[in-house]
Amino acid sequence: MIMGDLIIWLLNAAWLLPHLTALGALTFLSVRLVSNLHFLRRAGSLARHNSDQTPQVSVLVPARDEAAAIAGCVASLLQQRYPYLEIIVLDDASTDGTGALLDDLQAQSARLTVIHQADDPPADWNGKCYACHVLAGRATGDWLLFTDADTIHDPDSVARGVAYATALDVALVSSFPYQKVGTWSERLLVSFLLDFLPLLTIDFAALAQGKKTRVAANGQYLLVNAARYRALGGHASVQRELIDDFALARRFQAAGDRIALIQGGGMLTCRMYHTVSDVWYGFSKNTLGALDAPNRWRAFLWTPLFAWVYASLFVLPFVNLLSSQQWTLAAVEVGWLLLLRGAVVWRLKRSPDEVLTTPIAAWGVMALGMTALVQRWRHAPVVWKGRAYTK
């Protein structure tokens, strides 16, 4: 009788489980967000008071079919106020006039070196990794700044990156640019994935202290100590990785090097994608790459738990708003989640409407994840920039 009563009680109380999961997750994410915002304020203060060192920096830009963006990117780099700087851009077999634009820019500035690469990368290389490898081979700087062709840099972008590296005594600095968006798909997903989730899930302070924790990086701004980069094998050590920035950061972390993640709203801007298909395939590529990361068997083991927490946080509270019995708890959970998003939007000076689109963005990420799982199961190739990659 006692066992039967216990079972009945557990069944009756089961409705509380998703609420307990959501409230526990929200507590954890709130603490992480407060910690990260404190780290960013402290790091910014330290960098402002450690800006006197000026080692030689090589800015390295891989460019494949970037005719629409490359002139703005290079112009912003040529306007840097940093004194010891070389800029090297690789035209990676572009067919849209990128190479000609770069030749014109090179004729106007001795600071700019252009490399033309007509052939595809070797069969065992990811295209971007090989481009970065070639660029690094030509670089002479003490620090290497890998940045994307669709970024626009403020005049002190390089100087501030070096100041962060010096002040925090790290071997790798990765900045999250202010993400410009245009289409509805960009407005939904870009900032949610590149601003909101990292600030709530990555321990910035632990990475800067060299602790073994979840690692992240952003290839739009990746400043690395050249000596450490080469000692670790450079991009040749991650030559097949679809998410080369994460893979390279993992190499640094595994070697005991410290990593600084910073918000770069005052350093550079970027518009990653311009169409719905660009957004979908770009983020699908990154999600699929994450499934092929080291220790992926562990990721698959944790997938059911992750799915439960994600659903309890981003799906069930919105469904339970329609329930008269669970409405109060659901309203607390939804309000708390939107408050966290609002704090990030306010801190990064994003558009307020991103707060209201939070649930739709979260559901979009779920769709991306399921698409990547299907691709993984079918062994379907990833096509990006006209090249197919099979993992």
Image (spheres, rainbow, N blue to C red):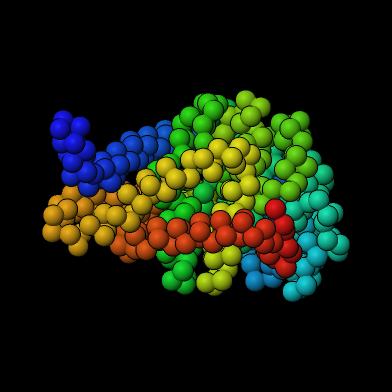
> Measuring 48% from the left and 52% from the top, which residue is drawn there?
194
Q: Residue at x 66, y 27 (%)?
A: 255
Q: Taking 57 as reference, is 276 left or right?
A: left
234 over 90 or under it: above or below: above
Q: Quadrant of the N terminus?
A: top left
Q: Nearer the viewer, residue 203 or 389?
A: 389
Quarter of the view holding residue 230: top right
| Residue 390 coordinates in the image, percent (x, y) | 72, 57
Seen from the viewer's position, the closer of residues 264 and 25 is 25
Query: Left or right of 203: which side holds 174?
Result: right
Q: Position of residue 33 (x, y in %)?
A: 36, 40
Is residue 123 rendered to the left or right of residue 12? right
Residue 59 coordinates in the image, percent (x, y): 70, 48
Point 69% across, 48% down: residue: 241
From the top left corner, tell me how far across and down residue 21 is, in percent.
Answer: 30, 42
Question: What residue is rendered at 17% in x and 59% in y?
Answer: 323
Residue 169 can be seen in this image: yes
